[in-house]
Image (cartoon, rainbow, N blue to C red):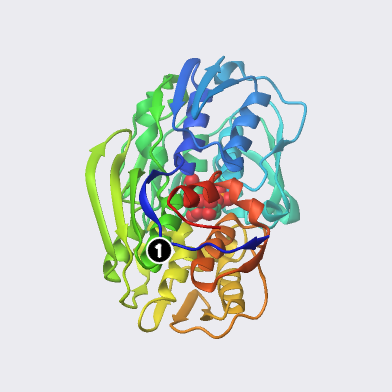
Amino acid sequence: MRINLTGPLTGQTQVPGDKSMTHRAVIFSSLAAGRSTIEGALLGEDCMRTVDIFRQLGVTFDRTGTTLTVDSPGFAQFTEPSQVLYTGNSGTTTRLLAGLLSGLPFRTVLSGDASIGRRPMKRVIDPLKEMNAHISGSHDNTRTPLIIEPAALEGIHYVMPVASAQVKSAILLAGLHAETEVTITEKTASRNHTETMLPLYGVALETGETITLPARGIERIRPCDFKVPGDISSAAFLMVAALITPHSAVTIQGVGINKTRDGIIEVIRMMGGDIKVINQTAESEPVATIEVRYTPDLKPVTLDGALIARLIDEIPVIALLMTQAGGISIIRDAEELKVKETNRIDTVVNELNKLGFNLTATADGMEIRPGRRQMKTGVDSHGDHRIGMMLAVATLITGETEIAGLDSINVSFPGFMEQFKQLGVKE
Ligand SMILES: O=C(O)C1=C[C@@H](OP(=O)(O)O)[C@@H](O)[C@H](O)C1
Ligand SMILES: C=C(OP(=O)(O)O)C(=O)O
């Protein structure tokens, strides 16, 4: 598809609901017997895969606008599915449900698309087996499909070897069924929505550097009316677009600014970007209005350590932002990018270099230099939604560009193009 976005971006907008929180709201609402509602749900493809799986287990979902009404018979009445449970492109669906399904009294099989088939599953299979789960994966227990047989689960004391909210949440979801408590220690904090949301659905747990979930938490789960904040990972594309496009000034309302997710705000401030976070309120999680303006003189920065987990999904578009800084920026400690929908170190570097930018891949991240040669060829999202959206934003700088695989955007940000047009962007 040929894309040519031209700015400026001006005005007010809101972004669709947070992907991580929508997945979790669908899961917890489905476990609880009775009616729950999810207001502001993200209806992108990834979250719909989670919805469809619970439909197969006997849960009913009704949609009005972006509100989902969930009617569930409760986890104890789930019905055994007759099909493979298809997780599409969604790592979150695959890993979180691997944990949850391990405690159900029937066999399930989880499988996704080609990208999911390449993503590492040993990181969930290993701790789940330690909990006595009967789970196996293809390729010597490292990949999907995952086959899960009924088992009586036990607790675990787990020290996380990698900062991953999906692994942490898989263990907690299995732990809901376990006969003994679960404790998890994180060296580097990953997003904590599972911990913030479980108490709202009736399951108390202790949080901090070590998380403690009491035995058989699932018995306490109850329905909830949950409001999903706007997704900061989606807002990131609008923020970067405004920062790099002359005369832009954008206000994004209702964005979730959970401390484990707000790294991009910190980076924009470090770079000297014109950003204001105002009207902070606490709903299910902290929410704010974010105002961003074009900033011509951005400073180069180095990102590493604990900050990386707080902006992991934003790195593709942050790398684009860094191409506009007045010096060399460096991203380190970001090996996890290699196991996302694509190897996001390679796809970001290769695709932006095709557009004439100057990036170098390193073992655990990338170096980004200012300046741009003439663009040579079209580019490709490689089926990765965040790469597709980053490349679309890049056309604000490059002008008309052929981008393959833009339909991947629907995975996390349906209405992406319309949102840009609403802010005055011409296509
Ligand atoms: O738990 C979640 O909702 C997510 C956790 C992160 O993955 P990892 O757990 O693999 O870091 C993130 O990249 C993904 O988009 C959503
Ligand atoms: C990595 C992502 O999602 P998931 O792991 O759920 O596929 C993402 O949305 O950038």
Crowding at mark 1 (Cα within 10 Å: few <14, some 14-19, many 20+): many
Residue at the spot x=46%, y=41% of the render?
Answer: 16
User: Hey, which quadrant is residue 132 in on the image?
Assistant: top right
Above/below status of 250 relative to 342: above
On screen, residue 363 versus residue 207, left or right, reads: right
On screen, residue 166 versus residue 248, left or right, reads: right
On screen, residue 328 versus residue 415, left or right, reads: left
Q: Nearer the viewer, residue 194 or 212?
A: 194
Q: Position of residue 240 (x, y in %)?
A: 41, 62
Residue at the spot x=33%, y=33% of the render?
Answer: 284
On screen, residue 303 versus residue 384, left or right, reads: left
Q: Which residue is mark 1?
A: 308
Q: Could one spot residue 102 in this view of the protein?
A: no
| The N terminus - image quarter | bottom right
Residue furthest to the right in view is 82
Q: Nearer the viewer, residue 262 or 99?
A: 262
User: Hey, which quadrant is residue 276 in on the image?
Assistant: bottom left
Q: Could one spot residue 137 in this view of the protein?
A: yes
Secondary structure at badge 1 equals helix
- Identified by mark 1, the residue type is Ile
Q: Nearer the viewer, residue 38 or 239?
A: 239
Above/below status of 305 relative to 156: below
Residue at the spot x=61%, y=41% of the render?
Answer: 45
Q: Position of residue 76 (x, y in %)?
A: 57, 17
